[in-house]
Image (spheres, coloured by chain):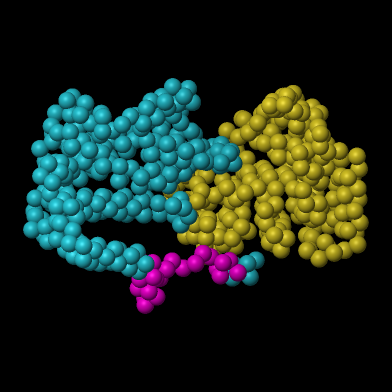
Chain colours: A cyan, B yellow
Amino acid sequence: MTEATGEAAGETLAVPPGKGPGRLRTLLSAYAPAILVFLTVGFAWEAAVAFFRIPKFLLPAPSVVIQRIIADAEPLAQNVFVTMQAAVAGLILGTIIALAFALIFLMSRILERALFPWAIIVQTVPILAIAPLLTIWLGFGIAPKIAVSAIITIFPILVNTVRGLRSVNRQVFELMRVIGASPGQTFREVRVFAAMPYTFAGLRISAGGAVIGAIVAEFTGANLGIGTVIVNAGYRQDATMLFSAIFCSCVATIALFYVVVALERLCLFWPDARLES
Amino acid sequence: MSAALAQEPGGHLPAISIAGVSMVFDSPRGPVTALKGIDLAIPKNRFVSIVGRSGCGKSTLLRLICGLVRPTVGEVTVDGMSPDLYQRDRRFGFVFQEATLLPWRTALENVALPMKIQKVVQPARREERARDLLKLVRLQGFEGHYPSQLSGGMRQRVSIARALSYDPEILLMDEPFGALDEFTRQEMNEELVRLWQEQNRTIVFVTHNLAEALYLSDIVVVMAPHPGRVRAVIEVDLPRPRRAAIRQGGDFIARLARLEEVISHD
């Protein structure tokens, strides 16, 4: 038995990609290809615009876009902030609704059969078409944006969480019965943890959707937000501003995505928790 | 005879008695008889193995004993009461084929889980006891490891420690070493005998490995499939303590051959 301990210690899973000089190299080799492609595309774009003398109102060069972002940094940041407020609120609201329905589905197959078609309907309704409706109902403030974001957010989280809650194998339930666990204890000790990786897989998808939802809602009537910036720039045929706005909202969306990833790292603390993605 | 057997008090009241038990499952292709006319008395503090081919209802029998499933006909009594009552008052220890550890709990937390669920031991004492149990199954130093960081044999040892954490008088084991390689399996056999001899318990051990059954048991119950029934109950009077070397002895091999004959005889 003692040698088994030694053998298993060797077997114990690989040390996480450690600190020290090896780490920088790992990071570099992980991101270098992406950065290289990114820079190449940027330079090719810049060169093509200069070489073919493409007018600015058709396709501005990256350098022009960057200059514009710097010049209009303050209004852009303000508008992105307004949009992101709605997106984050929508994501949180949508997550709460999705989790509530996942619980309902878990408790009753009949209710699941009755309500699941509605989840699909909500998912398939063209969001561009209900955004103006929601604006009519909820006004020009933040409310319709939150609603649209939430609607987009719900489905991926709901579907994934339901799957996660049901991903527990039969033997675990037998174990919980044998050690005398109540259904509530089984839920707290087993189901919650089993569902979490799935819920986060859904959240990762929904994070991007939430921002898109807020922007779309801003198209149909809002006073502030990156969506209004895009609409106005469109009227003025200001391609440079359009690119600037798109760039800024992309950066904000990526930031939100990484907030979700960070939260996931925090919640999924055990080694084999994260689903392969 | 070993100390454990000598201490057996007269042996009149069986730990587990199974009387006229049949079990019929509904399946898409109609009812399936999993067990038919099982009569079996398992004496206290004995090590009893149940062997047989796949589909002979070994695992079902184990689940009947602890009340996870109910017999269609017949009666199971454990220490004179129904499995449900016994489960509520004293609880069975159960070791599954897979270690069935919670991946989000460390080895220590997994061992402490039943105590946490049953609220029997004070929270401060739980950790101490879990630590002792991990030492008992020779896993000191691995308290903070998560299941995925342990080898298959170590995981199964954690699950045995967990089953022992609430000190059950009856330990049910469902092919616990079936997924392990032969070397680890033999090590685990030694370990189990040691644990059993340290403290008196009734162990019902399901396996399809005949050598394992013979080496571990006082009694081997041979089952036959389709429908699942008891074919023979064989006393194994090999002296205890048994050493691993007896597996190579002529007597052991002869017994193994006879056991194989009983199983394959149709």
Q: Name the quarter where the N terminus of chain B is drawn.
A: bottom right
Query: Which picture quadrant has residue B92?
Result: top right
Q: Is residue A114 visible?
A: yes
Within the magenta stretch, is there residue A12?
yes
Dominant secondary-structure state across the stretch colored magenta: helix
Q: Position of residue B6 (x, y in %)?
A: 78, 51
Up/down of A45 relative to A144, above or below: below
Percent coordinates x, y for residue B26 in the rendering: 69, 25
Quadrant of the rendering where the C terminus of chain B is positioned:
top right
Magenta region, residue range: A7-31
Residue beneath the point at 68% across and 45% down: B174
Q: Is residue A121 above or below residue A14?
A: above
Q: Position of residue B214 (x, y in %)?
A: 81, 53
Give the residue displayed 61% in from the left and 57% down from the top. B152
- Quarter assignment of residue B35: top right
Q: Nearer the viewer, residue B25 or B123?
A: B25
Q: Nearer the viewer, residue A201 or B8?
A: A201
A274 lies above or below A217: below
Number of callouts: 0
Looking at the image, residue A18 sits to the left or right of residue B206; the answer is left
Residue found at x 73% / y 60% = B182
Q: Is A276 left, or right, of B22 in this rendering?
A: left
Q: Report the residue that reaches farthest toward the front.
A: A52
Q: Is residue B105 visible?
A: no
Image side of residue B184 versus residue A120, left or right: right
Residue A21: image location, x then y, percent: 37, 77
B210 within the magenta span: no
Identity of the residue drawn at 21% across and 41% down = A215
